[in-house]
Image (cartoon, grey):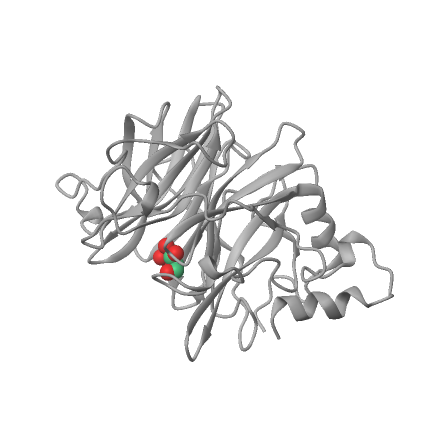
Amino acid sequence: MNSNTTAAILKDEVVPKSIAQKTHAEMPLLKRHSHNPILSREHWPYPINSVFNAGAVRLADGDTLLLCRVEDRRGISHLCAARSANGIDGWRIDPEPTLVANPREYPEEIWGIEDPRITYVPELEKYAVAYTSFARGGPGVSLALTKDFRSYERFGVIMPPEDKDAALLPRRINGYWAMIHRPVTTLGAHMWISFSPDLRHWGSHKVILEARRGGWWDANKIGLCSPPIETSKGWLTIYHGVRHTASGSIYRLGLALFDLERPDVCLQRGESWMFGPEAPYERTGDVNDVVFPCGQTIDADGNGINLYYGAADSCIALATGSINELLAWLEANPSSGDGIAR
Ligand code: BMA
C-alpha cells in the first residue's frame, strides 16, 4: 500500500483523535521540506561522490552551519562546512574540505572521518564535534573542539573500536561530562553513556537503551542520531533503529526521553518509529532506505525543530517539526516494555 492510499483511507476515519494520538501517516510529526534534498553533490565546489549525514548548529550570527560528511571518489569521507542564512538554501560551501583525516598523526582515521555530531558547550565557549574515525580496527569515536569550524583541537580516539554514533551533552552532570555512544559488544549494538572529568578519560560506562529483538523496527542495532535536546521533561533523543531484511537494512527514527540529571535513566521510549524512508531520495541512493540525522537546529521560540538528515547515503534533506508535539507523541505512544529487549 503506498502512502497516498494510506492517507485516503485514514481521511475517511471518523474517530476523533488528539494530535498526539494521530499516527504519523495521518499527520507526520516531521514534515519534509519542499526544497528537499537541500544539498547534494551537484552543489559541491569540488568533485565528490556524495554528501550526507551532517552535524548542524545555529551560529551566533544566525547562520545555520552544516558540517557535512562528504565521500570522495575513493570512497573515503571527510567533513566540509556549509553555511546558510535561512538553513534551507543559499549555502556557502567551504571551497576545500574543512576537516580531513590525518592518518599520520591519527592512524585510526586511515579510512576517513564520518558522521559528526556538534554540541555547543557554554562552559568552554567552544563546539564539541564527535565523529567516527574509520580504520582497520573498525569505526571508533573521535572528538575535536572548535570555535569557528576553521581550526580544530583534536583529541584523537576517545572510544576505541567498535564504537560510533556519539554526541556530548552540553553541560557537566554532577561534575562530569557525559557522552552517549554506540559500542558493539557481545551484548549487541545498544546505546551507552560514559562520563569524564576532562573529555579525555572516560568511565562509568552504562547501557541506556537496548536494541529490541525479533521483528521490531529497531531490532538488533540502534544508535544516537542528533545530539539530545534539553527540555523541561528530559533529554529528548532521536535514535535510529536498523531493521535487517532480505533486501538490505531499513534505517528509521524513534524517540526516547532521558532524565535531565540522570541521563543514564530512560524515562520513556516510543513504541513505533516516527519517521522512515518514504521519499524517492530516501528510498534510492548509494545505500537504499536510509534516513540518518546527525544534527538539528531549534527555532528562537524553543519549539520549532529543523532536523537535517542524510538520505540514502547520497544527499542531505530537511524535516521540520515541533518539540512539544514530539514530546506529546512520545507520551501517547509509550513502549510497553521500556528499554527491554524482547
Ligand atoms: C551506518 C553509518 C552511517 C550510514 C548508515 C547507512 O552504519 O555508517 O554513516 O549512513 O550506516 O549506510
Identify which residue, 158 or 134, lies in the foreground: 134
Identify which residue, 304 or 125, lies in the foreground: 304
**Side of 330 where 32 appears, left or right:** left
Q: Residue at x 53, y 54 (%)?
A: 239
Q: Give the number of marks.
A: 0
The percent position of residue 86, horizontal first and vertical second, equals: 52, 30
The percent position of residue 79, horizontal first and vertical second, equals: 30, 40
Q: Quarter of the image holding residue 106?
A: top left
The quadrant of the rendered image in which ligand 1 is seen is bottom left
Identify which residue, 223 or 260, lies in the foreground: 223
The percent position of residue 214, horizontal first and vertical second, equals: 53, 77
Q: Residue at x 82, y 67 (%)?
A: 13
Q: Residue at x 34, y 38 (%)?
A: 143
**Side of 7 where 160 appears, left or right:** left
- Assign the N terminus to one quadrant of the image: bottom right
Report if residue 235 is visible in the image. yes
Q: Identify the residue at the far left of this view.
A: 104
Q: Identify the residue at the far bottom of this view.
A: 246
Report if residue 198 is visible in the image. no
The percent position of residue 33, horizontal first and vertical second, equals: 56, 46
**Side of 215 where 196 appears, left or right:** left
* Rendered view: 15 above or below 37: below
